[in-house]
Image (tube, grey):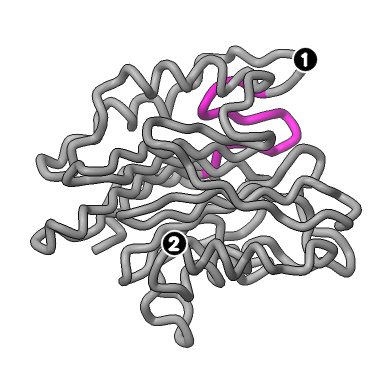
Amino acid sequence: MCTLVIQYRPGQDWPVILAANRDEMIDRPWQAPARHWPDRPEVVAGLDELAGGSWLGINDFGVAAGVLNRHGSLGPAPGQRSRGELVLEALDHADARAAAAALAAIEPKAYRTFNLIVADNREAFWLRHADPSGTLPATVAALPPGLSMIASGDLDDPESPRIRRYRPLFATAPAPDPGRGDWSGWERLLLDETETGENGEPGAMRFVTARGFGTVSSALIALPAVERPDLKPVFRFAAHRPVAAPWRAVYP
């Protein structure tokens, strides 16, 4: 149950700020975001060593993309492609609108269900593939201005204990100020381990279960306005499991 928070503020110096926690089986091998793909030299993203794709990344054109599993679809399935491919395919595009349009045309039977967020410094979109049978196509919705949060259900899902607890906290916490290098408010929330789950569902932003499933890393991305060519996108990353590592910049 990964979690992604996006603050979309048109007209600001940093119109898109994105925060994400990756929840995965701790023994699934991965590498921190970097330029892992020789055929995609413009892409900086985390590498899933098992399937070869990614869960979150950015490209040199200023597009960011992140994928999340939906309820009941953790892990690969025989005969279906890795959802990590979708992040890389989104990052093949120079703007978020083109990426969303291209990915909306995927064959839904080829993938397990997912949520995909793709954004640039002008627009942000949510792609939703929620039909396990693959009969229905993926849908695309433009994200509204303001703060949105998504996990394994729908956008701002009121049934999610994590979203119910943390969406108001992210909305009221001091927003990151990339120009000043201040990310502290959202960093604290991403690392919060206060357990608020219901019916066995983890509610904390960072957690680990007895079966070896937990929050393995956190990330923060900020995209500058097109009117500010002096500013560059920022991508910060911190590992938690299996080996902890402090926050560091992986882009630029």
Q: Is mark 1 on a helix, strand or loop?
A: loop
Residue 192 point in image, percent of width and height: 44, 22
The segment highlighted magenta reads 202-216
Residue 76 point in image, percent of width and height: 79, 58
Q: Which amino acid does label 1 sit on?
A: Asn
Q: Is mark 2 on a helix, strand or loop?
A: helix
Q: Which residue is drawn at 49% across and 68% down?
A: 98
Q: Which of marks 2 and 1 is nearer the N terminus?
A: 2
Q: Mark 1 points at which residue?
A: 199
Q: Is residue 113 visible?
A: yes
11 to the left or right of 211:
left
Q: Residue at x 75, y 34 (%)?
A: 211
Q: Which of 35 and 149 is in front in this view?
A: 149
Q: Can residue 34 be seen in this view?
A: no
Q: Residue at x 45, y 64 (%)?
A: 45
Q: Mark 2 points at which residue?
A: 96
Residue 27 point in image, percent of width and height: 66, 51
Residue 112 point in image, percent of width and height: 79, 55
For the C terminus, give its image quadrant.
bottom left
Predominant SS of the magenta segment: loop
